[in-house]
Amino acid sequence: MRTPNNDRPRLTDSGTASSPPARGRGSRGGHPVPAGGALADKASPPPDPLPQAGGGSVRTCVLSREESPREGLIRLALSPDGEVLPDVRAKAPGRGAWIGVTRAELETAQVKGKLKGALSRAFKTGAIVIPDDLPERVAAALQRNALDRLGLESRAGHLLTGSERIETAARQGKLRALYHASDAGADGSGKLAQAWRVGSEREGSRLRGLALPVPRTILSLALGRENVVHAGLTDAQAARRVSEALDRWLHFIGPDRVSAPCETHSQGATALAPSDAAEDEKNEGNK
């Protein structure tokens, strides 16, 4: 049963679905993408697990039919006009459909007509409109969500910028995650990665941080700062939250869409410090 127009997702200027004020939060779910970077190269040393988000809810991808934790999936919702839109924060009211596939897989399903059938069943109506650029809208929404998450952590005081500040925190063992703009120089990125390995007592490992698929201009705009080439997180919970947002984005766009060469497909795990929850809590208490 479809929801009334005044209870459906509203179309925002960005083309994503948003909810009316004072409405309840929806759900999330996905392809198995554990927090901490499930797409990381298995040859790199795995980090100790970070604290997981609560809930434990699972959803089923309408295309693959795989059940996964909702934090790894992407929710789609209907606008008042019946248009299918990304609802990556899972806030839109009404019935939703969940996908955990990559952009390439979504594009293939759309061309072959499989997506229309799957969404019609999920929304329990055939009166839906799938925009031709839905994959692009999903990618843009995931990028915006990930960069917004970084911005929130920056405003909360958990994020460092500037090579000297990041290197100091890294050598002191306070760095929890490391990110580089896609146009960052190899020398600068390598120097910070080396300092991080030393401070984390992981010399000789492949711990190096994550090359984000956006240049410094976009990263700077997202953080509200000038010329941000590198960024580091000093809070374990903040690192987990950012990792979840980045994992979904990077999993969806796939390795071929990343604008800068990376050591691994997403480098999610190598962007996070290898410390366990107890040590993270101890370090946070000493700040």
Image: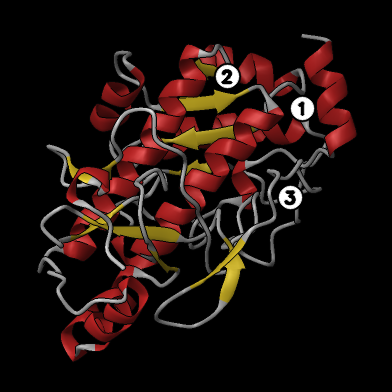
Q: Is residue 23 left or right of residue 69?
A: left
- Residue 107 percent across, percent down from the top left: 23, 76
Residue sitting at x 21%, y 80%: 110
Mark 3 near mark 2, Cβ–Cβ under 8 Å? Answer: no
Report crowding for label 2: few under 14, some 14 to 19, many 20 or more residues within 10 A (C-alpha).
many
**Sequence order check: which comes first, mark 3 or mark 1?**
1
- Residue 136 percent across, percent down from the top left: 19, 59
Indicate whether 133 appears above or below 185: below
Q: Which amino acid does the dot numbered 1 rest on?
A: Gly
Mark 2 near mark 1, Cβ–Cβ under 8 Å? Answer: no
Is residue 32 visible in this depiction of the protein?
A: no
- Looking at the rendered structure, the secondary structure element under dot 2 is helix
- Residue 183 percent across, percent down from the top left: 31, 38
Q: Which amino acid does the dot numbered 3 rest on?
A: Ser
Foreground residue, 141 or 263? 141
| Separation of marks 2 and 1 at Cα, in angstroms | 11 Å
Mark 3 sits on what residue?
205
- Residue 165 percent across, percent down from the top left: 56, 12
Mark 1 sits on what residue?
199
Of badges 3 and 2, the one in the foreground is 2
Residue sitting at x 33%, y 56%: 258
- Looking at the rendered structure, the secondary structure element under dot 3 is loop
Report crowding for label 3: few under 14, some 14 to 19, many 20 or more residues within 10 A (C-alpha).
few
Q: Quadrant of residue 99?
A: bottom left
Q: Is residue 279 left or right of residue 123?
A: right
**Sequence order check: which comes first, mark 2 or mark 1?**
2
Q: In this view, does 76 lie to the left or right of 246?
A: left
